[in-house]
Structure formats: structure tokens, C-alpha cells
Amino acid sequence: KQEVTQIPAALSVPEGENLVLNCSFTDSAIYNLQWFRQDPGKGLTSLLLIQSSQREQTSGRLNASLDKSSGRSTLYIAASQPGDSATYLCAGSFSSGSARQLTFGSGTQLTVLP
Amino acid sequence: EAGVAQSPRYKIIEKRQSVAFWCNPISGHATLYWYQQILGQGPKLLIQFQNNGVVDDSQLPKDRFSAERLKGVDSTLKIQPAKLEDSAVYLCASSLDPGGRKLFFGSGTQLSVL
């Protein structure tokens, strides 16, 4: 059974700080990994998608990396802003699954303090 | 481009009652997913459709949950009878194909079972 873990569950940082969110997974046969953002009372918004053949993806101030051998992914947020406050979830799509379903972590709730 | 539409936004019922949720995916998206998100946890896949056929329903409690996707477009998820532990946000998502590509989520239906 694939497991995806995110630690810490919550993180507070002052505005302008660079930060890293962590995601770990137990199955190295990963097809891809996605990072999502979830605002309170809202659905999930896909931020970055990394295929298993890739090492990283970048979008604006966001950079996500994938290391299959260590079973880890990180989401780097540069120059954080209060608007970045949200819950960030990672989800892995694993080749061993019959339908490549996404397995989600529990998320890291980020608060950027002005 | 219209996003994934879900209704109702909120629902409060008593245990043992029945409830139904509706989802309209993004036009042209063949794959539709229903997720259950319990407070403080990541979303858990309940069922995945490819067009109007079920691809994966291994985590759907079939004694009380049912889902259908008529004509490969809209989908409904039903719970009958509801239990207290069914209190959660029910998220619908769609994607162009089942290959674990970018998912687009609706805002969800928040269900409270009293």
C-alpha cells in the first residue's frame, strides 16, 4: 500500500521568507507527483506536476523537486507572501496501482505572517 | 473555460437519512473522480470513472455508497443510509485522461451528519 506523508502538519513563517515543504512516499514506482493548494472551503488547485522522468518543475516563485530513490519531494516557495497562506498537499500517482489513482498526503497548513 | 461544478455546497442531514451529490466535469474530460476528505486529512479516492465506466471503486463502501455517470458526463454520488463518520467534504475532480495528469477539482460539498 502506497503511503504519502507530509511533515510538519502546520508551519508559520514571516513574510518574505523562503520556505520548503516536504513530502515523502513509500513506493519508488511513482508515475508522477503533484502539488496542490487548498484554500479554506475550496477545492484543490494543481500547482505543479512532476513526471517520474523529471527532477523538478518551476512555476513563478514555486519550485518542486522529485527524488525517487529517496522517496521524497519538496516544494520550495520563494519570497513568501500572506496570499500564499493555504494548505499544501502532495499526491503521488503510482505505477503499481491498477488505475494510477492519486494517493494524497494530509497536507501542510502554511501561514505567512505580514 | 468553466471549471468543475458541484452542488449542493453544503448539506446537513441526520444519520440514517439519504443524500445525493451532483458533479458536472469540465467539458471534454473523460475521467471523473469522487474523493472524500475528512477534516485534517488528505482526499481519499472513492470512485474513478472513465467515460461512463467504473475504473476503480475499491475504496467505495458499497453497502451504503453508490455512484453513476450517465452518458459519460455528469455524475451523482449517493449515500444511503448516512452514518456519523460520513461527515466530510466530497470533492469531484476531472481530467482529460486517466494517466494521472493534471486534475481539476470542484469546490466540494460539505456534508454534516448529525
Image (cartoon, helix red, strand yellow):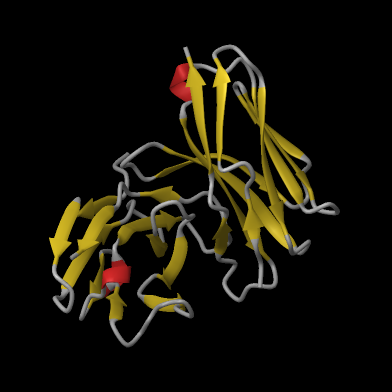
- Residue at image coords 40%, 62%: B35
Out of B99 and A85, give the one closest to the viewer: A85
Q: Is residue B32 visible?
A: yes
Picture quadrant of residue B50: bottom left
Position of A72 relative to B66 (above/below): above
Residue A59 in percent (x, y) is at 61, 27
Horizontal arrangement in the rendering, residue B92 relative to residue A48 (left or right): left
What's the residue at 32%, 52% (across, down)? B27
Give the total number of marks visible in the rendering: 0
In the rendered image, is residue B8 in sight? no
Residue B78 lies left or right of residue A87; in this view the side is left
Residue A3 in the image: state x and y as whole percent: 65, 63
In percent of width and height, residue B51 lies at: 39, 70
Q: Nearer the viewer, residue A83 or B87?
A: B87
Q: Nearer the viewer, residue A20 or A56?
A: A20
Instruction: Locate residue B16 relative to residue B110 in the image: left or right.
Output: left
Toward the right, the furthest residue is A69
Residue B74: % across, % down: 25, 64
For the point 64% across and 57% down, which residue is it? A4
Q: Is residue B69 left or right of residue A107?
A: left
